[in-house]
Amino acid sequence: MKNRQWLLAKRPVNQLSKNNFQWVEKEVECIKNGEFLVKNLYLSFDPAQYGWTQDTESYVDSVKIGEVMRAVSVAQVIESQHDKFREGDILQGSFGWQEYAVSDGKSGYMRPFRIPKEVPITAPLGILGNTGLTAYFGLIDIGKPIEGDVVLVSGAAGSTGSVVGQIAKIMGCRVVGTAGGTEKCRWLTEQLGFDAAIDYKSENLNSALKKLCPDGVNIVFDNVGGDFLSESLLHIAEKARIVLCGAISSTGKAQSSIHVSNYMSLVIKRAKMEGFISMDYMKDAPIVINKISNWIKEGKLVYREDIVEGLENAPDTLSRLFSGKNLGKQLLKLADPE
């Protein structure tokens, strides 16, 4: 049986493209005692994957040249000599950009775990996985929202930003989001309940924030970085909290060329700016996932998935994140469960 794979061929210097990967076919490995074989069903795509292709210090090791590109996925066990995982089980794990993967259940970026049958098969890759946890812990633990706070979310039509805004609304906050294009902005206000949305492609951020947040912003949840972060600092209220989740606008740029201005606003407004990694909160993950599940059941929180099909499209699917083409959580479908 053949296994089609995407390997990291060379590290991107600027923008990531298909040329950074190599498409190969090889025989599926035979499993040994204590191992199991899975067939990938859905792959998750996240901005962090660009960082994994870089040979720089990070919270996880870089993908090595010649290795299968790392990705979290949902997969089905099709053969097993493992005492914990049985044939037919649906798992989440770090199985990479490939059709099949062999695992011992211990090694890899993420230890695999069984997905309960009552959970939608793709939800652990997004709303009931790292996306939901990142949104919750960043907003609640770092942002510390208080009823009546004004919350500004960048990249608000993305998987994380869209959840942040909705949780802020549940907490009783006024929420303003930024997104690129009329369709995304309408989705935020008409379906997700944002109080306002700023189209950064056609509106001036500084002017829009003066109008929409005349008394200042209490929480900035930043997924974008760059010019957005610099301009948002001009509009923070006293004791504001700036949550640094990502800097997707800086993807492909040298660190030495990335600058943030207006940082004296942090001093003048006695504000705090802090980054975080959701992996630091994993001990509390089950409680939060249950809370998010209840919000979904109650109709307080909705989510959207942007699904591309075909493993051959993996590099282009990742690039969608950095061109702003995705709306909601970006996934790639390989197969249906049997």
Image (spheres, helix red, strand yellow):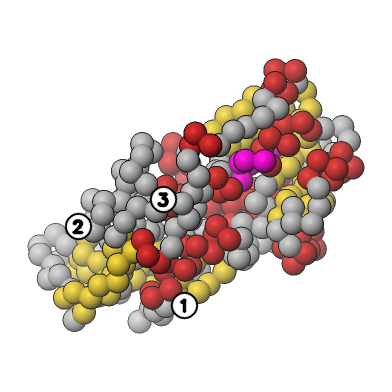
**Vertically, is 264 above or below 175?**
above
> Comparing marks 2 and 3, which lies closer to the viewer?
3
Camera-nearest label, 1 or 3: 3
Which residue type carries mark 1?
Glu
What residue does disc 1 label? Answer: 309
Decide which of 319, 123 is in the foreground and name it. Answer: 319
The residue under label 3 is 13
Rendered location of residue 187, percent (x, y): 74, 64
Residue projecting furthest to the left: 33
Residue indicated by mark 2: 104
User: Where are the magenta residues, as a range?
Assistant: 220-227
Name the amino acid, label 2.
Answer: Asp
Q: Residues within 10 Å of mark 3 (few under 14, many from 20)?
A: few
Q: Secondary structure at mark 1?
A: strand
Question: Going 22% across and 69% down the picture, which residue do you hit?
Answer: 37
Q: Position of residue 317 (x, y in %)?
A: 48, 67
Q: Earlier in the sequence, mark 1 or mark 3?
A: 3
**Residue 191 seen in the figure:** no
Q: Is residue 236 left or right of residue 12?
A: right
User: Dot 2, how many residues are within 10 Å of its Cα: few (below 14), some (14-19), or many (20+)?
Assistant: some
What x and y, as percent, mark residue 49? Answer: 42, 53
- In whole angstroms, how far apart are the C-alphas of marks 2 and 1? 28 Å
Question: Residue 192: x percent and y percent?
Answer: 73, 59
Dot 2 or dot 1: first in sequence order is: 2
- Locate residue 99 relative to residue 319 in the image: left or right: left
Alpha-carbon distance for marks 1 and 3?
A: 27 Å
Q: Amino acid at mark 3?
A: Val
Q: Residue at x 77, y 31 (%)?
A: 234
Label 1: how many residues lie within 10 Å, few (<14), some (14-19) or many (20+)? Answer: some
As for residue 16 lying within the magenta part, the answer is: no
Q: Nearer the viewer, residue 256 or 105?
A: 256
Residue 10 shows up from this direction: yes
